[in-house]
Image: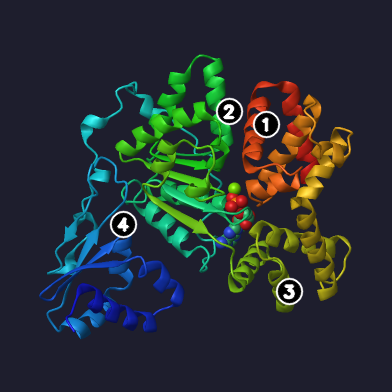
Amino acid sequence: MSITAQSVWNNCLEFIKDNIQPQAYKTWFEPIKAVKLTDNALSIQVPSKFFYEWLEEHYVKILKVSLTKELGEKAKLVYIIKMENTYGNKQPFTERIPSANRSSVKAQDVDIPLNNKSPELRNPFVIPGIRNVKIESQLNPNYSFENFLEGDSNRLARSAGLAVAAKPGGTSFNPLLIFGGVGLGKTHLAHAIGVDIKDKYPEKTVLYISAEKFTQQYIDSVKKNNRNDFIHFYQIIDVLIIDDVQFLSGKSGTQDVFFHIFNHLHQNGKQVILTSDKAPVDMQDIEQRLLSRFKWGLSAELQNPDFETRVSILKNKLYRDGVEMPDDIIEYVAKNIKTNVRELEGAIISLIAQSSFNKKEITIELAKQIVEKFVKNTKREVSIDYIQKIVSDYFQMDVDTLQSKTRKRHIVQARQLAMFFAKKFTKASLASIGSQIGKRDHATVLHACKTVDNLSSTDKQFRKYVEDITKKLSV
Ligand code: ADP
Ligand code: MG
């Protein structure tokens, strides 16, 4: 049988797999492709520069051992960094790093055009001296890396965040998109990156802003006729962190302006960090050109933390608050609240509060009562039936009317609001929302969400409905 790049690499993988954690294997080795074998040099393709750096830093020994076993003492490893959608390259960008003296290859030697900062690219609009204007970062110093506990569920995102913080704009993670469900730490991690950058590079201008606030500022700037000032302000930022970009869905004006700001920052080697509650592929009503920009860098998911991570998050929280709690109670809480770190913390806080207000001892019984409340409440909050009930109560109609086929305007609006909130507050797909609210199809739901978005930005009365119902759904 002839030896091919693939067969050599497969053997290496087998060896590596036996010697490292399964999660690490999945993260760092599965995405690698073996591409070429010449004499004693194996070329492997990795998806980013960061990937290469990570392998060199953490797995160089095991790579060497396994490859030497296959190809003998003179074995060499050649990395090919292949990024998809690389900016400024018509062709896919590939790069080789000669492996003759791999250990002396420094990260800086991997020169990716993405990060070229040519002085000609300076913003022609910046008024001289404006850089001296101090911009408040809006960062929360309590959200640090130190208290963002590591686990399998967040390892990739966390380490990508650390890499970005070490070299803002200087890694291939630009933009860095952190995505994941509610309460899993997106905002915390985004702040942590900013805080760390401010710490390491105090001269850099870092700005944290929610997509919602960004949108509001943009709308105001259009009203006040100073859209250009708005754009210029954002173009002088070194590290721009935008939280919850899914909020830009359907807002084409804001998307357009963000597209231009993004391009400007990116071309100038500035770092962009985004968070979203969905992966780029699942984002709806975001322009294609913007989505493709999101995919230039790295999309890293925050998953539900496993049991051990949940326990360490709780212990860390208690430690910081100076509270002691028996292990079996911590474990009980961690075992029963699984999908949301914010709720996990909430349960512990009410446990502490209950016991100190009522001077009760913290017992398993008390923990059970509190956890039950938490689990029940969240279940009630997210059901589509509950949303339909709240919306129809609000408009003083019954649920059957809300679901009926009528085209009467106020009923249609109530139905559209129910669909909008179902999309917002549950994980249900458009199709399943449609089928539960009057047997409509997914396009109808999509249309409803758009209509509600539009109306709430143009119609004051309608915005009041949205606000009122949001409040009712959040208690
Ligand atoms: P998201 O933005 O994804 O909805 P947040 O960043 O607001 O979530 O996190 C919710 C809460 O959970 C915050 O108080 C945050 O500090 C905490 N949290 C989330 N992940 C972790 C973690 N890995 N370690 C410690 N605390 C965490
Ligand atoms: Mg958040």
Task: Measure the alpha-carbon separation of dots 4 and 3.
Answer: 41 Å
Mark 1 and mark 4: span between their CA atoms? Answer: 40 Å
Q: Earlier in the sequence, mark 3 or mark 2?
A: 2
**Residue at image mark 1:** 452
SS at mark 3 in the image: helix
**Amino acid under disc 2:** Gln
Discs 4/3, front: 4
Res. 104 image quadrant: bottom left
Q: Amino acid at mark 1?
A: Val
**Point 46% across, 47% down: residue:** 194
Q: Does label 2 or label 4 sit earlier along the sequence?
A: 4
Labels 1, 3: front one: 1
Look at the numbered disc 1 and give the secondary structure of its residue: helix
Task: For label 2, count other residues whose C-alpha is less than 10 Å away and answer few (under 14), some (14-19) or many (20+).
Answer: few
- Along the line of sight, which residue is nearer the eye, 28 or 411? 411
> Is residue 475 something one can see in this rendering?
no
Question: Marks 3 and 2: CB-CB under 8 Å?
Answer: no
Residue 426 appearing in the image: yes
Residue at the spot 48% in from the left edge and 48% down from the top edge: 281
Q: Mark 1 vs mark 3: which is more N-terminal?
A: 3
Q: Where residue 33 sits: x, y (%)?
A: 29, 66
Q: Amino acid at mark 4?
A: Ser
Give whichever of discs 1 and 4 has the lower sequence position.
4
Q: CA distance from mark 3 to mark 2?
A: 43 Å
Q: Which mark is residue 48?
A: 4
Tally of numbered discs: 4
Q: Identity of the amino acid at label 3?
A: Tyr
- At 50% from the left and 26% from the top, the residue drawn is 253
